[in-house]
């Protein structure tokens, strides 16, 4: 089965886009790689985010494009991630990627897990 392309859904900030491009370059990954995001069980609030670079499509992948970046998630995770923004912070309070998720009813203090 082919992956499904949808408009909108998961977004990326300009800072996150720039950091993704930098990491892809540093790791020697080509244009065939994309950002795979998903939601897995775990963390102090019950659900955690997972993010990785991938170059293999899976059946029923949900595909989003924003600011020139291909963002891919699985069918189950899209329910939790719809309208979520992937952001990047390089400030004093922590450096790294984080998710701005309007679907989360509660998040933990570290921001790495959530519940709906």
Image (spheres, grey):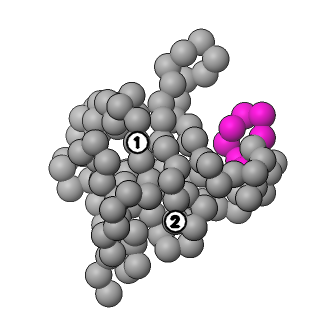
Q: State the CA–CA distance, disc 1 to disc 2.
A: 15 Å
Q: x, y (%) of residue 49?
A: 60, 51
Which residue appears farthest toward the bottom when viewing the image? 1
User: Horizontal placement of 73 versus 98: left or right?
Assistant: left
User: Horizontal placement of 9 versus 47: left or right?
Assistant: left
Q: Is residue 23 visible?
A: no
Which circle marks residue 97 in the picture? none
Q: Nearer the viewer, residue 35 or 5?
A: 5
* Residue 4 belongs to magenta span: no
Specify the quadrant that holds the N terminus. bottom left
Which of the marked residues, 1 or 2, is nearer the chain's N terminus? 1
Q: Which residue is drawn at 56% across and 72% down?
A: 76
The residue where tag 1 is placed is 12
The residue where tag 2 is placed is 78
Q: Residue at x 29, y 60 (%)?
A: 55
Q: x, y (%) of residue 50?
A: 55, 52
- Picture layout, residue 66 above or below residue 57: above
Q: Nearer the viewer, residue 2 or 33?
A: 2
Q: Which residue is drawn at 42% across and 47% down?
A: 11
Specify the quadrant that holds the C terminus. bottom right
Which residue appears farthest toward the left when viewing the image? 31
Q: Which residue is drawn at 69% across and 51% down?
A: 104
Q: Can residue 20 be seen in this view?
A: yes
Q: x, y (%) of residue 109?
A: 77, 34
Q: Give the range drawn in magenta.
A: 108-114
């Amino acid at each position: 089965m082919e992956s499904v392309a949808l408009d909108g859904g998961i977004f990326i900030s300009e800072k996150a886009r720039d950091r993704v491009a930098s990491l892809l370059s540093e790791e020697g990954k080509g244009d065939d790689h994309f950002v795979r995001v998903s939601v897995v069980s775990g963390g102090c609030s019950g659900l955690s985010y997972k993010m990785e670079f991938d170059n293999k499509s899976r059946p029923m992948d949900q595909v989003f494009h924003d600011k020139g970046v291909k963002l891919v998630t699985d069918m189950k995770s899209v329910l939790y991630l719809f309208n979520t923004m992937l952001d990047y912070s390089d400030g004093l309070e922590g450096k790294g990627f984080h998710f701005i998720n309007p679907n989360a009813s509660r998040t933990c203090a570290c921001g790495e897990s959530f519940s709906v």
